[in-house]
Amino acid sequence: MQRIDAHQHYWQIARGDYFWMGPHVAPIMRDVFPADLAPHLQAAGIARTVV
């Protein structure tokens, strides 16, 4: 049986529409793209994702 991750978020800070980001979310205040998620999916045994 394949495991599917049905929820993830990607963002690019330079777009400027992430008004809620600030020092209080410093660990995630960076660009996040599908390639950043790939090693985590592999480690967790996730076969596919839904965007």
Image (tube, rainbow, N blue to C red):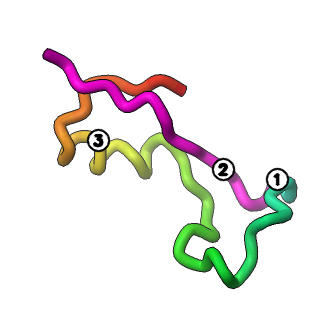
Q: Helix, strand, or loop for circle 2?
A: loop
Q: Quadrant of residue 41?
A: top left
Q: Are marks 1 and 2 in contact (CB under 8 Å)?
A: yes
* Nearer the observer, 43 or 15: 43
Left or right of 6? Residue 47 is left
Q: Which residue is mark 3?
A: 41
Above or below, comparing residue 48 to residue 15 in the picture = above
Comes first in the chain, label 3 or label 2: 2
Most frequent secondary structure within the magenta stretch = loop
Other residues around mark 1 within 10 Å, as few (<14) / some (14–19) / many (≥20): few
Q: Are marks 3 and 2 in contact (CB under 8 Å)?
A: no
Q: Is residue 31 magenta?
A: no
Q: Amino acid at mark 1?
A: Arg
Above or below, comparing residue 39 to residue 31 in the picture = above
Q: Helix, strand, or loop for circle 1?
A: helix
Q: Which residue is mark 1?
A: 15
Above or below, comparing residue 50 to residue 28 in the picture = above
Q: Which residue is mark 2?
A: 11
Q: Amino acid at mark 3?
A: Leu
Question: Over which residues does the magenta segment extend?
Answer: 1-14
Q: Amino acid at mark 2?
A: Trp
Left or right of 3? Residue 17 is right
In percent of width and height, residue 1 lies at: 13, 15
Query: Is label 3 or label 1 in front?
Result: 3
Q: Are marks 3 and 1 in contact (CB under 8 Å)?
A: no
Residue lying at 37% horizontally and 31% vertically, measured from the top left: 5
Q: Helix, strand, or loop for circle 3?
A: helix
Disc 1 versus disc 2: distance between alpha carbons?
Answer: 8 Å
Other residues around mark 3 within 10 Å, as few (<14) / some (14–19) / many (≥20): some
Left or right of 13? Residue 48 is left
Residue lying at 73% horizontally and 60% vertically, measured from the top left: 13
